[in-house]
Image: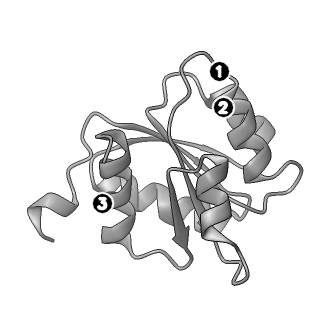
Amino acid sequence: MHPDSVPLAGLRVLVVEDHADTREIVELILAAAGATVTTAASAEEALVALGGADVVVTDYRLSGESGMWLLARIRERPAPIPVLLMTGLADINARELETAGFARILKKPVDPFRLCDEVRAVVRGR
């Protein structure tokens, strides 16, 4: 591991993913890099767990409401936090999603180093 790609110590990350295996893998990657990770299986559950998070990493297609719906609810808050989108959809329009307000768009499967780098960069405002 190169030093710049890992340290997430002190960051609170909310991971929103309806597939348990993927949710657990993303949680393990971020926790191994030092982040404090909370998980949610749906957008609705994420809104309840959102308090205190520095950044949200969400799937686009969730059971129930979508990652886009979650982004809209987060942007309505007085102090919105950055939201990274992970998606396995090949036909997704990244520019459209960035215009909607997603801080980064990551295609699944996500490289663990890139995931950590992007989370850190978004929180630092880069």
Q: CA distance from mark 3 to mark 2?
A: 22 Å
From the viewer's perspective, is residue 3 above or below residue 122?
below
Circle 3: element type: helix
Of 39 and 72, the residue lying toward us:
72
Are circles 2 and 1 on residues that touch, CB within 8 Å?
yes
The residue tagged 2 is 74
**Residue at the spot 21% in from the left edge and 62% down from the top edge:** 5
Amino acid type indicated by mark 1: Arg
- Mark closer to the chain start, 3 or 1: 1
Q: Which mark is residue 77?
A: 1
Amino acid type indicated by mark 2: Ile
Q: CA distance from mark 2 to mark 1?
A: 5 Å
Of 4 and 91, the residue lying toward us:
91
Image quadrant where residue 21 sits: bottom right
Amino acid type indicated by mark 3: Asp
Indicate left or right for 37 with 88 as reference: left
From the viewer's perspective, is residue 39 above or below residue 11?
below
The mark tally for this picture is: 3
Q: Which mark is residue 117?
A: 3
From the viewer's perspective, is residue 53 above or below residue 37?
above
